[in-house]
Structure formats: structure tokens, C-alpha cells
Image (tube, rainbow, N blue to C red):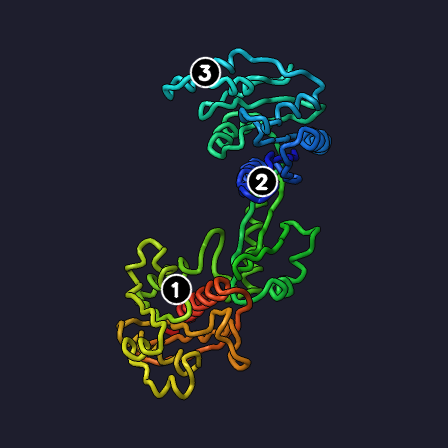
Amino acid sequence: MNAVILSIGDELVLGQTIDTNSAWLSSQLAAEGVMTVYHQTVPDQIDDISSAITTASKSADLLIITGGLGPTKDDLTRNALAKVLNQQLELHEASLDRISLFFKSLGREMPPSNKIQAMLPKGTSPLNNDWGTAPGIEATISNCRIFVFPGVPREMMQMFNRYVLPAIPTNIKRCILTETINTFGAGESTVAEKLGDLMQRDRNPLIGTTVSGGIVSIRIRSDFPAIDTARSQLEATVDIIRGRLDELVFGRGKDTLQEVVGTLARYRKKKLATAESCTGGLVARMLTDVTGSSDYFIGGWVVYSNDLKTRELGIPVELITEYGAVSEQVASAMALQALLKAGSDLSVSLTGIAGPGGGTPAKPAGTVWIGIATKNDGKASATAQRFIFPGDRSIVRDRAAKTALNMMRLSLTRGYT
């Protein structure tokens, strides 16, 4: 069984509102063994909507449309559906009564403009909406079953569960399982090269990659008749991916770097600290975004000026003068002093030039030194690595913070602390 999802609205086409409905619907359908063929975002124009409905109904068994059922002049989905069905809109009295009662429950009279929401294409069925004013619409074109829902996510989700799920045949001999493997530390092309034959488009499970915020995610879709086969093939593929990518892999699904660092620190019973300059406390903030981070995060310093680096962390003025604040020596010293002063087992430091100004040929904007200090058998030591991150100020800071978290993850994973 295949499905198409149409999202209606100028605000979606123009990027003023993000279409979260399609992603949610696709995941719910996949869990039921229904493959979404495509999503399409359509502007508030009758001809565009009717054309999209006509095309989708020829390629899908199930068509879900969201949006365009409101009471204003730009809500035209019902009109477009009527055009495709070659039917007139007619007033559905029961739906009008429900809309009127909805407003009365709020202590208000129904505005006359809301009457249009009870106008449905002749021959279609209304779908009651207990969470808003707009009823949904059910129709059929040839072998395609059509459900039209309001674009409000809460209303759409409730109506999908009520009307679409029971309409999906229980004898679909298809199970679609998905998983995401998250990696950090290598670009998308490098990850793809390491995956090699796993990236072939005729493979099942099917694998693809996406990049967001420096994190390369590997999407896996396992599509088999039996759930046991789908699950075993999915997990076998996950194992192969982990074997090929090794330490690049940091988590699955919605795992974040800071969550993984926290899990490792708690498991190893290690305390963490930070010393930040160019990131302005971003690493500390990300660490403390995780519930229960007080179990392992002691605290940190934001030492933006050279003077504060000296006063708060005891970085020698001579060291800064000789090598510069953005240097291996200062980054190492910052990490070491943070570890010693906080009494932590592992600390990280960042000093750099976030840009756009402040760069030199030797130290261009985007240059960041990240130091990491560890304690082994009571002996503390520190090292630092140089990175050059492309992008604007916010991107440089974000990449630097994630790289610092990744360095902490690797240190904890390898057992250096």
C-alpha cells in the first residue's frame, strides 16, 4: 500500500511555517507498513491543489491532505477537491451544528465566516473534529482513498488516529522499520566512502545520509514482509555500519553528543569541567541541557579576555604574550587549570577566533584550539588540537562546541580517564 501526502498553504511554500505534518504522517504510515511515495507542498490556489490531487490519486492507494480547511478566502482545499470530483459544495447541516456547538462551548457565537467549513463536496463524507472547528473530508477517486484534515498538527494527529489507522488493511504483508545512526568527526563524503556497497540504491535495508550541524546521520529503512526479518536485517545492518565507522558513531535515533557524554561520564563515575573563551559557555550550556547533569558536571569558566584567563585560571601572562591567546599552549593550559581547580577527572577548553573579524593569515577566522585534560593514576596532563571551522560566527561556535563534546566522548570511550 502506497501513500501520498499533500500539505496545503502559501506559508508552507514560502518557508514561513515548517511542515511538520508530513514528517509525522510518514513515520506513522511506515509503522503500519504503508510506504509514502512522496510529499508535496502546494500553494493556496485552486488549480494547483486540484492538479496535485489528480496526480496523487493516480499513483497512490491512500492520499492524505492537510491544510486549507479554514474559514478564510485562502482556504481552498474543499473547493479544489470539489473541482476534481466534478461536484458542487453543499451545506452539511450536522457539521454546521457541531461548529456552532464548538463556539458555544467557548462562550462565543459562531462567526458567519465559519459556515464555509460545513460546506463539503457532494458525495463526500465529513470527518468529525473534536479539537477544532474544521471537519475533515473523506472521498474516493478510482482506487485512491482520500482523507482531508485541518493543518493544525494537534487536530490532524487526533483525526489521523481516529480515521486513517482503522482504514489501513490489517493484512498488509509489509513491515517497514527505520533507524538513524549518528556520527561526528568526518564529512558526509568520507562516511559514504566507508559505507561503500551499503549505499547501493537497490539494497534492502536501504541506506542514505543527511547532514545537519556537522552531524552526519545514516538513515536505514528495512522493508520486509515479516517484522522479525525486518528487525533482524535492520540490526545486522546497524552492526555492519558500526564496524565500518567505528568511533565516528556516537548514537542512534535522537541521541545527542551531550547526552552520550553524560551517559559515559556517569557510567565511568567521572567528573567534568570546562574552560571557554570563543564559545562563551556554549559547551557548559549543552552539557547542562541534559537532565541529571549535576551528577557529573562540576562547572566551568567563561574567560573571554586575556586578563580573566590569567586572574581566574592562572594562565601566565608570559605564555599568552609569547604564543597568543589562540594557541596550543594556552588551550592546553586552560584545560589543565580547569581540571585542577575544579577537581574534575576530565576537562575541555576552547580558545579561538569565531569571526567574522579578528583573523590573520596565520590564524584566520574560524581557527579554534581545543584542549583536553585528563587525570590518570592521579597525574594530570593536557593536549590540544587545532581546527579551522568554515562558516559564520554562530556556525563556528556551534561546530567548536560539538567538537569539544566529541573529544570528551572519545576520551571517555577510550578509557583515558
Q: Residues within 10 Å of mark 2 (few under 14, many from 20)?
A: some
Callout 3 amino acid: Ser
Label for residue 283?
Answer: 1
Of discs 3 and 1, which sits in the foreground? Answer: 3
Would you say the residues marked 3 and 2 are in contact, meaning their CB atoms lie under 8 Å apart? no
Sequence-first tag of 3 and 1 = 3
Callout 2 amino acid: Leu
Quickly name the residue at label 2: 12
Q: Residues within 10 Å of mark 3 (few under 14, many from 20)?
A: some
Q: Please name the residue shown 38% across and 21% down the image.
A: 106
Marks 1 and 2, how far apart at CA: 34 Å
Depth order, front residue of 186/78? 78
Could you tell me residue 210's position as x and y percent?
A: 59, 55
Callout 1 amino acid: Val
Quickly name the residue at label 3: 100
Could you tell me residue 302's position as x and y percent?
A: 34, 69
For label 3, the SS is helix
Q: Is residue 101 left or right of residue 199?
A: left
Would you say the residues marked 3 and 1 are in contact, meaning their CB atoms lie under 8 Å apart? no
Marks 3 and 1, how far apart at CA: 53 Å
Depth order, front residue of 143/273? 273
Could you tell me residue 379's position as x and y percent?
A: 31, 81
Sequence-first tag of 1 and 2 = 2
